[in-house]
Image (tube, helix red, strand yellow):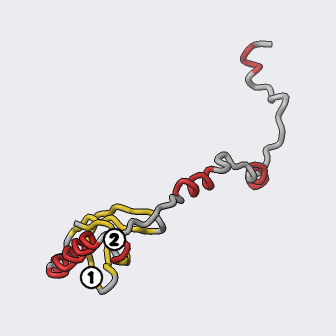
Amino acid sequence: MKEEDLYTLPYPFSKPKMDLNTRAKIFLPFNALKGFEEKINEINQVDTIKVQLDDNMKEEIQSILTYYSGILSSKPYIHITYLENECYRMDTGLLMDIQPGYILFKNKIIYIKDIYEIN
């Protein structure tokens, strides 16, 4: 028998191919990242104590908002730090509107009592 003849012989251990649906069911329970999503959620849950602003800081925020209300038509770009879901967030973007008690920032309502810093 020549070497070329070996390439034409059928593979001795051939099995019938499994259909794709059956094969997918075998691997369905496999979760390579077991516990990963729980760890991510645990990391994102930060216990934050809300900072109590003194009167000077409250007045400063109010004066900045008064200034921005005068130039609101020009859509001012602001930097803001605010409390969201028990966590302080820093963000930049367009200030859309100022209302009594809250501002509209990037189509998100932020209550003035939750603002830590704005400029």
The residue at 80%/29% (across/down) is 11
User: In x, y percent, where is residue 25?
Assistant: 77, 54
Q: Is residue 11 left or right of residue 67?
A: right
User: In x, y percent, where is residue 40?
Assistant: 56, 53
Mark 2 vs mark 1, CA separation in Å: 13 Å
What residue is disc 2 on? 115
Mark 1, Cα crowd under 10 Å, few <14 / some 14-19 / many 20+, is: some
Nearer to us in this view, 79 or 53: 53
User: In x, y percent, where is residue 80?
Assistant: 29, 66
* Quarter holding residue 57: bottom left
What residue is disc 1 on? 98
Identify residue type, mark 1. Ile
Q: Give SS at disc 1.
A: strand
Nearer to us in this view, 41 or 48: 48
Is residue 28 positioned above or below 115 on the image?
Answer: above
The residue at 82%/34% (across/down) is 14
Residue 88 at least partly seen: yes
Count how many numbered circles sit on residues in the image.
2
Q: Is residue 110 left or right of residue 118?
A: right
- Quadrant including the N terminus: top right
Q: Which mark is residue 26?
A: none
The residue at 79%/26% (across/down) is 9
Query: Mark 2, mark 1: which one is toward the viewer?
Result: 2
